[in-house]
Amino acid sequence: MSPRATRLALVAAAVSLGGIALAWAAWPSPPPPRPSRPPEAYAPIAKIDVHVHVPAPRYEEAAAAFARHGVRLALNASGGHPGEGLDGTIAASARVDGAIRSYCNLDWSRAEQGFADYATRTLERCAERGAVGLKIFKGLGLGTRLSDGSRLRVDDPRLDPAFEAAGRLGLPVLIHTGDPQAFFRPPTEENERYAELEAHPSWSFYGPEWPSWEEIFAEYEARVARHPGTRFLGAHFGNAPEEPERVARMLERYPNLYVETGARVPELGRHDAARMRALFVRHRERILFGTDIQLGRSAWILGSSGAEPDSPARVPFFYEAHWRYFETADRDFAHPTPIQGDWTIDGLDLPVEVLHDLYHRNAERLFGLPEEGA
């Protein structure tokens, strides 16, 4: 297999496992930092995490862990396809009294033949089974190939029926397009995300065989613009946490766009805290809480990973770093995912009403979920 084919296969494998890549190189797992405050020091607001990945056999374990850290409801981006995983995660949801609910997924490789009928029927089944939305992995735009070997673009018009059906059925679309901008730069020691790229070579999209980050992002924006009746939830802070002002401009331009914070607090926390606080306040009804916490068949992955999965002992610190970022004015503290970068972050000290919007109200409105206390 050629290097290019190998990398495409690894991307596909990562997507099929909900983003947990298998290409691990030697990278030590850091010891769990100690939380700096007791849990009671943070706002006692029950959270909804709109971006998690949990296999059906681990629902009970995951729901218990989420609840211990104040997450009353989580939305599983790896919900599966009808007849291929979705039935299992829907059944698992019943075992935990609905504390974890499923997005559904589509097979984009069917784009060239009968896609409109397939996508419409599949999404209708998803809605009937109780899926909360449609999740799109980064494989669309980066991994899925057409029969002639060309890349299936995010804005390929043949895919329009899926997005129109999602809007008609009231299924919000959680869409992950591209990846961190650093993953499109040379994977050398000068790259600030080199630790991740060394541990996961398949995460590098640098080279002539890949589109540029700007090209992928333009396709994502074109897709959002084309479907004003469909509500999009831009994963990983609208797929551009490196450029929050760019995300803010999209929020202004497209009233059907929302964003979530999954796995990007390390990046968001690098920006000027006053500017970020103003952005969160201005768009208080359009930003949702997410972590991208992942449970594999036996592992935990807390935003990202090195060669080895994270220790469960790091879970309290992972959550505490999020609360500290959103709720305090602390400066220069450790972010929740050390492998994502060797820097510290500054807290936003958000007003309590904005915290309620971020932590649960926006998710309740967007997904039609039960209100806190209902």
Image (cartoon, grey):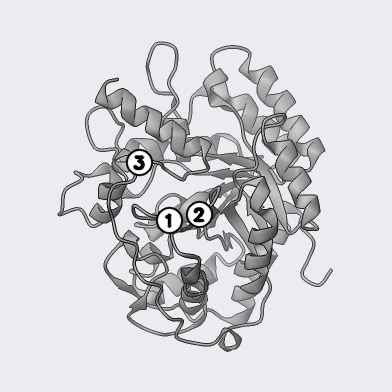
Can residue 47 be seen here? The reply is: no
Residue 304 is situated, as x and y percent measured from the top left of the image, at 41, 55
Nearer to the camera, 355 or 10: 10
Spatial CA distance of label 1 from label 2 is: 6 Å
Q: Circle 2 sits in a helix, a strand or a loop, which is it?
A: loop
- Amino acid on which disc 2 is placed: Ala
Residue beneath disc 3: 23
Dot placed on the residue nearer the N-terminal end, 2 or 3: 3
Picture quarter with the N terminus:
top left
Nearer to the camera, 66 or 309: 309
Residue beneath disc 1: 309
Mark 1 and mark 2 in contact? Answer it, CB < 8 Å.
yes
Can residue 32 be seen here? The reply is: yes
- Amino acid on which disc 1 is placed: Pro
Q: Circle 1 sits in a helix, a strand or a loop, which is it?
A: loop
Position of 56 with respect to 141 (left or right) is right
Residue beneath disc 2: 299
Residue at coordinates 34% horizontally, 57% vertically from top-left? 242
Dot placed on the residue nearer the N-terminal end, 3 or 1: 3
- Amino acid on which disc 3 is placed: Ala
Query: Dot 2 surroundings within 10 Å: few (below 14), some, or many (20 or more)?
Result: some
